[in-house]
Amino acid sequence: MVKEKIIEVPNPPLSTPSLDNIELCYSYAIARGEMGVLTFEPYKSMILPFWAFRTVIIAQKSAQVLWEIFISFCERGDFVGSDMTRKFIQMGMTRAKRYANHKGGRKYGNDGNVLAKWTDDDVDGKRKEKEEASEIFKEYWRRCQNHEKYLELKEEWKEGKKKHDRANS
């Protein structure tokens, strides 16, 4: 039997390093999709332990906890933290979908060629489970994308980054 990952909302809430460090704050890049999610420290290391999608139950708990983290960052005015959390939620959606589409989750082989997709012989239900996990994250990702405070913080951050970049060029 596979040991289930225990995922709980962090208490106390995760720290907000970009609020205390302007250089860290504006070195961040929104980028496309989930780009940078696995490289931007210290947020990557803070949020990564809460991200998982192996089963539907784990995906539901992970997405719910990540949503709580997202809200916590938004409430404290940390755009970088909220956007990084959004990226983890988006990555849950895309990675689970990749596992639903490609057995073993690998899209490309060692030779660089695209690997075959699943056939319809999903006898153990793994493909269906990953599709469900992807949909769970997708619902939370949409919430993030439309969250009013997040959108406000995003606009404020963009303006601040412009001013910061002008002042430092």
Image: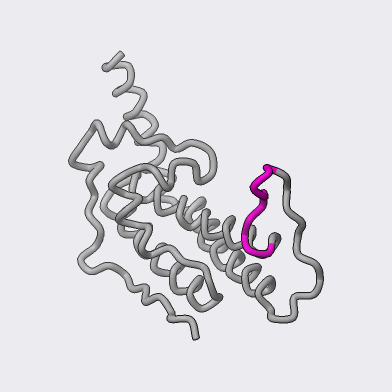
Q: What secondary structure characterizes most of the magenta part? A: loop
Residue 63, how many percent across, how many down? 46, 66
Q: Quadrant of the C terminus?
A: top left
Residue sitting farthest toward the bottom: 1
Residue 89, how many percent across, how many down? 48, 58
Q: Residue at x 43, y 79 (%)?
A: 4
| Closest to the observer, 72 or 122 | 122
Q: Residue at x 31, y 32 (%)?
A: 26
Q: Is residue 58 above or below residue 93?
A: below
Lateral position of residue 17 relative to residue 125, left or right: left
How many numbered dots are placed on residues in this image? 0
Residue 95, how many percent across, how many down? 57, 58
Residue 144, how many percent across, how many down? 47, 55
**Residue 40 part of the magenta-drawn span:** no
- Corner quadrant of residue 12: bottom left
Q: Residue at x 51, y 78 (%)?
A: 57
Magenta-colored span: 103-112
- Corner quadrant of residue 154: top left
- Corner quadrant of residue 28: top left
Residue sitting farthest toward the top: 169
**Residue 106 part of the magenta-drawn span:** yes
